[in-house]
Image (cartoon, helix red, strand yellow):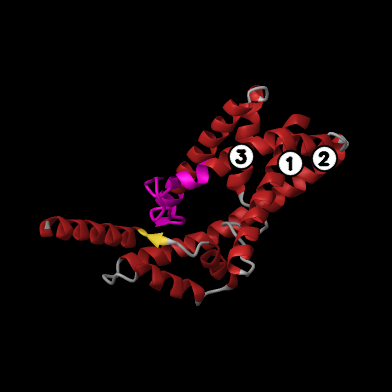
Amino acid sequence: MRQIALYILLFFLYAFLGWLMEVLVIFVTNHKFVNRGFLIGPICPIYGYGCLLIIILLNRYLHEPITLFFMALVICSILEYVTSYLMEKIYKARWWDYSNKRFNLNGRVCLENLIPFGLLGTFIMYVINPFFVSIINKIPNLILYIIVIIALIIYITDNVVSSVIMSGIRKEIKKAEEDQTEEITKKVKEILLSKGYLSKRIIKAFPDIRTYKEILVKLRESINKKINKDSKK
């Protein structure tokens, strides 16, 4: 039971660190605070899940740092790709897109992110996780269980509320895709920005949101350009 509680608490710690990292990156590049992620609270679950996978699956490779580096790279890349795919299928929108970056795979993952994934996974296994575990091991069982239960209640509540918000966004995206104009993403953003704070937060957190139809329009434009270019040769 304590081991399960340990993993749950580690999940929340890494999810918070992932959120903090993304917020800091946006703050440094754009000089403004943006609450990143789908949830209202200060966590990005994908980082929590990714770190747990690394900790559980790669513990056996602690004496092989190079192997651990490449395994962490692969695990994080697969997780990002699968998450992007599932979110697109569920909400009918592309929430991040690396199509404009070199060496990308379907716009879901790109080579530019692979090295940081590996370095981050290695840093977690050798530095951050031993530190976190040493602190958590000092917490008595009862207090640890109370902390975990409270965190889970907040997390579940946040997921429910955020799911309701995302459901509304999905409806707006579906309505926009029925339109025949090419400025679909712009229209979706305008509609959602006119709604409440939580909908605005999603748009600010994912400024590159793209609907299926816009992706198809961009793809068609790209194909037409290539055809016209080839015909001139």
Q: Is mark 1 in CB contact (under 8 Å) with mark 2?
A: yes
Tag 1: Cα neighbours inside 10 Å, few (<14), some, or many (≥20)?
many
148 in the magenta segment: no
Residue at 58 percent of width and 68 percent of height: 30
Residue at 63 percent of width and 23 percent of height: 64
**Sequence order check, earlier mark of 3 and 2:** 3
Residue type at mark 2 is Leu
User: Which residue lies under the disc numbered 1?
Assistant: 9
Residue type at mark 3 is Leu
User: Which residue lies under the disc numbered 2?
Assistant: 144
Residue type at mark 1 is Leu
Q: Please tell me whether mark 3 sits on a helix, a strand or a loop.
A: helix
For residue 151, side relative to residue 187 (left or right): right
**Sequence order check, earlier mark of 3 and 1:** 1
Residue 132 seen in the current view: yes
Q: In the picture shown, does residue 210 fall above or below 132?
A: below
Q: Which of 182/142 is in front?
A: 182
Image coordinates for residue 157, horizontal then vertical, percent: 65, 54
**Sequence order check, earlier mark of 1 and 2:** 1
Q: Is mark 3 in CB contact (under 8 Å) with mark 2?
A: no
Q: Is mark 3 in CB contact (under 8 Å) with mark 1?
A: no
86 in the magenta segment: yes
Spatial CA distance of label 1 from label 2 is 9 Å
Q: Which residues fall within the magenta stretch? A: 85-114
Which is closer to the viewer, label 3 or label 1? 3
Image coordinates for residue 137, horizontal then vertical, percent: 84, 34
Which is closer to the viewer, label 3 or label 2? 3
User: Which label is found at residue 119?
Assistant: 3
Image coordinates for residue 209, horizontal then vertical, percent: 44, 61
Residue extending furthest toward the front: 233
Tag 3: Cα neighbours inside 10 Å, few (<14), some, or many (≥20)?
some
Q: Which of 174/227 is in front?
A: 227
